[in-house]
Image (cartoon, rainbow, N blue to C red):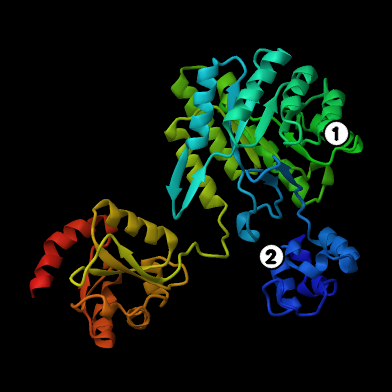
Amino acid sequence: MATTISPTDVYKYLPRTNCGECGETTCMAFAVKLVNREAFLDECPPLLTDEYKENYKKLWEMLKPPIKEVKIGSDDRAVKIGGEYVMFRHELTYVNPPPIAIDVTDTMDEALLVDRVKKIEKLIYYYIGRNIHLDLIAVRSVSKDPETFRKAVRKVKENTSFPLILCSLDPKVMEAGLEELEGERPLIYAATKENWADMGDLALKYGCPLAVYAPEDLDLLVSLATTLRKFGIEDLALDPGSFPGDLLHKTVTNFTMLRWKGIKEEDEILGYPLIGSAISSWFYVEGDEETKTWWEAITAAALVMRYADLIMMHSLAGWNILPLLILRENIYTDPRKPVSVEPGLRTIGQPDENSPVMVTTNFALTYYTVLSDIEAAKIDCYLLVVDTEGISVQSAVAGRKLTAETVADALKEFEVEKLVKHRKLIIPGLASRLSGEIEELSGWEVLVGPIDSSGIPKFLDEKWKKAETS
């Protein structure tokens, strides 16, 4: 575990040549990053040679995560589940955001199936500088007919590059789907106490990861995982059952217990990724579609917060999916590193020498909020992004990361005076107390802008036009 390994323990197995091929100046610096899970063994080229083969093995055993990382898919769109080191995000960081799979069924009309696949793949939302999206498609056998399932899997494969999960408890139906995806490593869902031997054979035959399903029976889950592991299957994922409504608390408790066993007690049998089936709301909740979707959203959110490494869902409603994607994004950022953008001068629209110059920080959420508001209002301007080490305006002012000096230095560094003939600078309302000092150090006239960037258009209409003529 990360807390019991020191950089010195790691360093003695590294090449100790200080070659710099890993990007660090010394092997000790690389060892520190390995211990902090900020670097990976494969980033050291000498370790991958035969000379250091045994050292690599020892380091891998020393540094491997207590929760096994399992890959679903075989191409560039493959996803990783598991690979976690800690129970709580603040202890280190979470590693692999749980991919979200949306289902299709083999009884869907072909046109409807293709349309749903396309909607799943095209659901993309731009958030804090990156596109967040869904990750997998789960093909469920409702017909229980091998040929019907085969055709559905084939049609999905033809219309998506997403990795797939094949869902059936019938080994004959499952094999029909696997034959269509040979070499593509779909997740087989699932092995149970009734079919584990046949599903295990299929996992070995097709080289696929295998889900183990034992709802509300953790002892059975352990027994099946132990047996399948002895069977020779290395890539397993565990589904202890996910239940909404009055049983949601039990679901969260089960997931927490399994993760505790895997990480804190280093139980290798339970050190596998956990599958959360929020889709169960559609089978267990009574009521209309909106009620089922609501419970699916609640269950999925609870599972993101409490240790699910993969989540299966049904609804594509925006009010269900988008909050979940954003929640996942926020939970799986590295708490040791503020989410930041590169400082510098941004040209927005087509500004000229008379256009306003505004200031913000390089905290990603602040930057993209300001940028979005400016672009939405179709404002031509220059935006000076000051390096505050990824901290928001109010915190950066309080913590002396956004100061008159940093603003004045940024104006000089990025040669803003060469772009405009005026010397007027608009600073955020939350940085108003810096206005006098900035004027003294920079020689620019400071205008205090709105506290919230949504007020920028109104501010420019009311204040900038007056400032231009003064």
Residue 139 shows in the view: yes
Residue drawn where x is 54% and y is 15% of the image? 109
Give the vertical position of 237 relative to 465 (above or below). above
Give the vertical position of 430 relative to 99 (above or below). below
**Marks 2/1: CA distance?**
32 Å
Q: The residue under label 2 is which amino acid type?
A: Ala
Which of the two residues, 345 or 358, is positioned nearer the viewer here? 345
Give the vertical position of 279 relative to 15 (above or below). above
Q: The residue under label 1 is which amino acid type?
A: Leu
Give the vertical position of 29 relative to 157 (above or below). below
Counting from the top left corner in percent of width and height, residue 66 is at: 77, 52
Residue 296: mark = none
Counting from the top left corner in percent of width and height, residue 397 is at: 37, 73
Q: Secondary structure at mark 1?
A: helix
Q: Secondary structure at mark 2?
A: loop
Q: Nearer the viewer, mark 2 or mark 1?
A: 1
Residue drawn where x is 72% and y is 73% of the image? 21
Point out the image quarter for the N terminus. bottom right
Residue 39: mark = 2
Residue 204: mark = 1
Counting from the top left corner in percent of width and height, residue 171 is at: 79, 20
